[in-house]
Image (cartoon, rainbow, N blue to C red):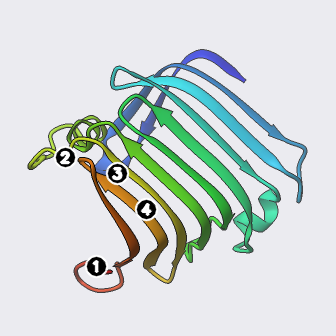
Amino acid sequence: SCIRCTVRITGVRAAEIVLQAFSGRWNWAGGASRVSVSAEFKWRGEQVDVNFAADNLEDLQNGLPTRVVSAFNAKPAKFSFDGQSNLTANLFAEGKVTFEAASLKNFLAWSEPGATVGASIDALSLTANLNAKDGKMLFSDMVLSAAGSPATGVFELDMTGAAPKTSG
């Protein structure tokens, strides 16, 4: 457990990520047992709560599917996943995913400062069944609301080629 720590992480493109007022807990008995991680911190001026639990840490690390429940909660956005996953180079995930942002433009500006953010989409919410493997993400039974306009159906993101492709 770390209480009121400052954590520095080197992220994508060697950018330094600073988590302030960090408080976290890690519970794991070892071996093939359940693991849970929770953390609270300030990042870019916003309070963030993160929770993660996996039924079997060894399976998760060795590429075998195990039940995973995760949640990210901050003022700019909320995300959750409840399903099966692994944490290897051949990432696999299958389960229910949710995402909410009161303003997609504000979320993108907060999560990637300096990024060019186009036209504003106010509120965005997504609920779907996710199947991710082999560089593809399929969102089925999707319920999407963007700026108050609802949509339902299936959406696929294929990241296996030189440029991402979408369909649905």
Per the model, the C-alpha gap separating discs 2 and 3 is: 26 Å
As helix, strand or loop, the secondary structure at mark 4 comes to strand
Asked where in the image residue 113 lies, by quadrant, the reply is top left
The Cα atoms of the two marked residues, 1 and 3, are separated by 24 Å
Looking at the rendered structure, the secondary structure element under dot 2 is: loop
Q: Three-letter amino acid code at disc 4?
A: Val
> What's the amino acid at mark 3?
Val
- Amino acid type assigned to the residue bearing label 2 in the image: Ile
How far apart are the two marked residues, 4 and 2, measured between alpha carbons?
Answer: 17 Å
Look at discs 3 and 4 and give the one toward the viewer: 4
Q: Which is nearer the eye, 85 or 123?
A: 123
Q: Is residue 66 left or right of residue 168?
A: right
Q: How many marks?
A: 4
Q: Is residue 165 above or below residue 88?
A: below
Whichever of callouts 4 and 2 sits on the residue coming sooner in the sequence is 2
Which residue appears at 35% of the width and 36% of the height? Answer: 16
The image quadrant where one finds the C terminus is: bottom left
Q: Which type of secondary structure does the marked residue at label 3 adopt?
A: helix
Examine the rendered structure and indicate whether residue 162 appears above or below residue 151: below
Residue at mark 1 to residue at mark 2: CA–CA distance: 19 Å
Which residue has dot 3 on it? 12
Frontmost residue, 156 versus 50: 156
Residue position marked by numbered label 4 in the rendering: 143
User: Label 1 sits on what residue type?
Assistant: Thr
Q: Nearer the viewer, residue 162 or 167?
A: 167
Q: Which residue is mark 2?
A: 121
Residue 7 drawn at (x, y percent) = 50, 27
- For the N terminus, which image quadrant? top right
Few, some or many C-alpha atoms within 10 Å of disc 4 (few <14, some 14-19, many ≥20)?
some
Where's residue 21, x and y in %?
Answer: 51, 16
Q: Reading the chain from its start, which is encountered first: label 3 or label 4? A: 3
Tell whether 93 sits left or right of 37. Answer: left
